[in-house]
Amino acid sequence: MAASVVAICNMALDMLAAKPIASLTDGSTTANLCQRNYEPARDETLRSYPWNDAMARVSLAASATAPAWGPTYAYPLPADCLRVVVTEDDALYGVAWRVEGREIVCDEAGPLNIRYIRQLTDPSLIGPLLARVIAARLAAAIAYGLTGDARVTQGMSQAAEVAMRDARRMDALEQSSDDSLIADTWTGARYLPYGI
C-alpha cells in the first residue's frame, strides 16, 4: 500500500523512467510537476468510478434555504464529496434527485441518506490498485512536461486506461452480488437491507 503522496508520485516517475523525488518541495522540475498535478490526478481518478476505498455514507440535513423553484429541498454536500453515487431512497424507490453546485436538490424530506465518493487526502487510505491508477494518471499528466514527447504521453494515457480497467475489475469483486438484485420496486422490497 502506498504510504505517502511522494510514494505515489515516485510510482508515476518509475513509469516514466525518471529519477525519484524525496519531496514535493525540493524545487526540481520533476517535484514541481508532481506537486501541481497530483491532486487533480487523484481527484479525477476518484471521481471516475465508485471506488470502495473512497466510498462514504452520510445523513444530510436540509438547508434552511429551499431552491428558488422546482424541487422542495436542498441538501448541502459534505466538504469532501467528489461525486454523489446514490441516495438511499433512490436505491430503494427510484426517487429523483440532482446535484446543483454543492447541493443535492430533490423533493424528499430529510434527513437524506447518501453514498458518495470522498476526497482521499490521506494517502494511507488509498489501496495499492487505486494508488497504481492514480500514479498512471499522474504519469500521463506529467509525461510531456518531463519528456517533451507526445508519444510517451499517449503511451502513459493508454497505460492509465489499462490500470483503471484492471483496478475496477478487482474493486467490483469486493461486494456481494446482492447489489445487482435491486432492479425494481418488488425486488427492492424483498431485499431491503442489501445494496444500499
Image: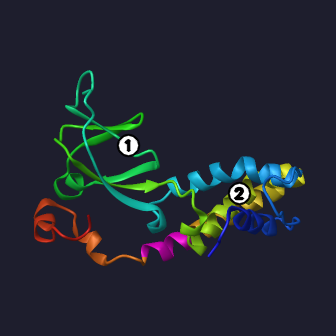
Q: How far separated are the C-alphas under marks 1 and 2? A: 27 Å
Amino acid, disc 1: Leu
Amino acid, disc 2: Leu
Residue sitting nearer the eye, 170 or 55:
55
Q: Which residue is tagged 1?
A: 77
User: Quick one: label 1 or label 2, which is nearer the N terminus?
Assistant: 1
Q: Position of residue 89 (x, y in %)?
A: 20, 53
Q: How is the image coloured?
A: rainbow
Q: Quadrant of the C terminus?
A: bottom left
Residue 167: in magenta span: yes
Residue 154: in magenta span: no
**What mark, if any, has residue 138 been given in the picture?**
2
Q: Residue at x 53, y 58 (%)?
A: 120
Q: Residue at x 25, y 42 (%)?
A: 61
Q: Quadrant of the N terminus?
A: bottom right
Q: Is residue 115 above or below residue 77?
A: below
Say few, some or many: other residues with alpha carbon within 10 Å of mark 2 (under 14 / 14 to 19 / 20 or more).
many
Does dot 2 land on a helix, a strand or a loop?
helix
Residue 162 in view in this figure: no
Q: Residue at x 57, y 56 (%)?
A: 121
With 169 as the anchor, is 190 left or right in this view?
A: left
With 114 as the anchor, is 7 left or right in this view?
A: right
Stretch in magenta: 166-172
Q: Position of residue 157 (x, y in %)?
A: 70, 58
Q: Residue at x 65, y 72 (%)?
A: 2
